[in-house]
Image (cartoon, rainbow, N blue to C red):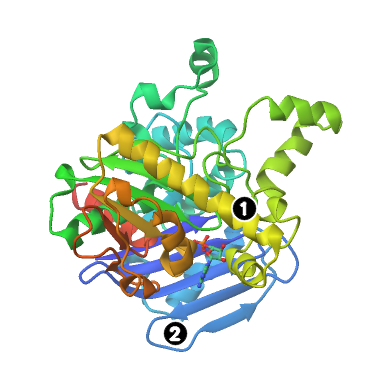
Amino acid sequence: MKVLVVNSGSSSIKYQLFDMTDESVLAKGLVERIGISDSIINHYPSDREPVITHQDIPNHRVGIKLMMDALLHSEYGVIKYVSEISAVGHRVVHAGEKFSGSVLLTDEVMDALKECVELAPLHNPPNILGIEVCKELMPGVPQMGVFDTAFHQTIPECAYLYGIPYKFYKKYKVRRYGFHGTSHKFVAQRAAKILEKSLEELKIITCHLGNGSSITAVKNGVSVDTSLGFGTVAGIIMGTRCGDLDPAIIPFLMDKEKLTVEGINKIIYKESGFLGLSEGISSDKRDLRERANQGDERAIRTISAFTYGIKKYIGAYAAAMGGVDAIVFTAGIGENSKETRAEVCEGLEFLGVKIDPEKNKVRAKEAIISSNDSKVKAMVIPTNEELMIAKDTAEISANL
Ligand code: AMP
């Protein structure tokens, strides 16, 4: 069975075609700069050289058509007929409270996703557009939706409600949703496999640390709390997003700086986090580390605030779950930065976390990095959201 995974963003489309018999990737690619100048399609067949094509890509329809052309191409394609694709799995950012798992994208589901547009105005419209174009170009091929929010729908009311008048929950569905759900679910499942335990008996804290970051408490296989909330800006500080903030700061800054809603949003989503706190050094963790190693105080304080935030969430989630068996690090920073992992775990010995510096030298591969006598297992597990989407898609497809 071949499953195509599509992640349709505002100006890009990422895709991967999986052969689910062995979960191998037949081809993957990235259509970039849709609707902007210098559009480009990067196609990587797994058994041949990459093909990079520069071409005008005015909209998603053209972008998805080019993706299909690349997959079917006589020289660098990997399939002969569209009908070889058994199903398509789409990454959708926000499904509100409507879905707690992946589903077949029927007309009713599409209507429900459109209702969620106001909750994710930047993400859901291009996701929906990608689905609509795929449905059109691949008639008869089942299309599934895999939602970033779905894994967190198990979070209990006490953790998803904010302490504002309840009417705003009823009226506007203002609550914690959480994101990166596909990643948290994937690494939690892998952790259980590696530890040779059942996921249902484990308390795991998954730290997805990338350009966007979130931490999740996974108890008995389900998400019970997560650091991102109503939007994608809360929790620990990120590349350009501020993380947790006293709400009083928002009206204060709006008043002082004469900011519009757009203006304050720009600050908290685009100008804060690593970039803002370091006074513009970079939103990229590697640059900050380099500058911190040279003694740059701005980089040092930014990294300290990042690490401190993660540590605090680990403590909170251990308390929320009544203990912790494993802490998992994933995504760009979590998978690659031994310094971050060591700094986060330093001082957590009281909780039973003991990092082995030698084992921690690992990069981007599955490993247990805690010492043999560590009560809590610290682990590195590369995330693979595409594979998780493909697996969900194949499972739904098999049951149609
Ligand atoms: P992601 O959003 O998962 O692609 O992660 C992007 C983040 O991972 C950026 O802040 C990068 O600086 C960081 N990153 C990637 N490689 C490394 C590395 N070798 N060491 C430290 N951070 C890294």
Quadrant position of residue 102 = top left
The residue at which mark 2 appears reads as 74
Task: Report the front residue among 125 and 388.
Answer: 388
| Badge 1: residue crowd in 10 Å (few <14, some 14–19, many ≥20) | many
The alpha-carbon separation of the residues under discs 1 and 2 comes to 29 Å
Sequence-first disc among 1 and 2: 1
1 vs 2, front mark? 1
- For the residue labelled by badge 1, is the local secondary structure a helix, a strand or a loop? loop
Query: Which residue type carries mark 2?
Result: Ser
Cβ–Cβ under 8 Å for marks 1 and 2: no
Residue at the image position 63 percent from the left and 66 percent from the top: 292
Is 327 displayed left or right of 310 in the figure?
left
Which mark, residue 10?
1
Q: Is residue 59 visible in the rendered structure shown here? A: yes
Q: Is residue 137 visible in the rendered structure shown here? A: no
Vertical order, 51 against 31 (above or below): below
Task: Report the front residue among 327 and 209.
Answer: 327
Residue at the image position 59 percent from the left and 61 percent from the top: 12
Image quarter where the N terminus lies is bottom left
Task: Report the front residue among 122 and 157.
Answer: 157
Can you give x and y, in whole percent of width and height, for residue 357 in the image? Answer: 35, 70
Task: Report the front residue among 84 and 130.
Answer: 130
| Badge 2: residue crowd in 10 Å (few <14, some 14–19, many ≥20) | few
Can you give x and y, in whole percent of width and height, for residue 211 in the image? Answer: 56, 57
Is 116 displayed left or right of 269 in the figure?
left
Which mark, residue 152?
none
- For the residue labelled by badge 2, is the local secondary structure a helix, a strand or a loop? loop
Can you give x and y, in whole percent of width and height, for residue 127 in the image? Answer: 52, 48
Query: Which residue type carries mark 1?
Result: Ser
Residue at the image position 34 percent from the left and 73 percent from the top: 25
Residue at the image position 36 percent from the left and 22 percent from the top: 157
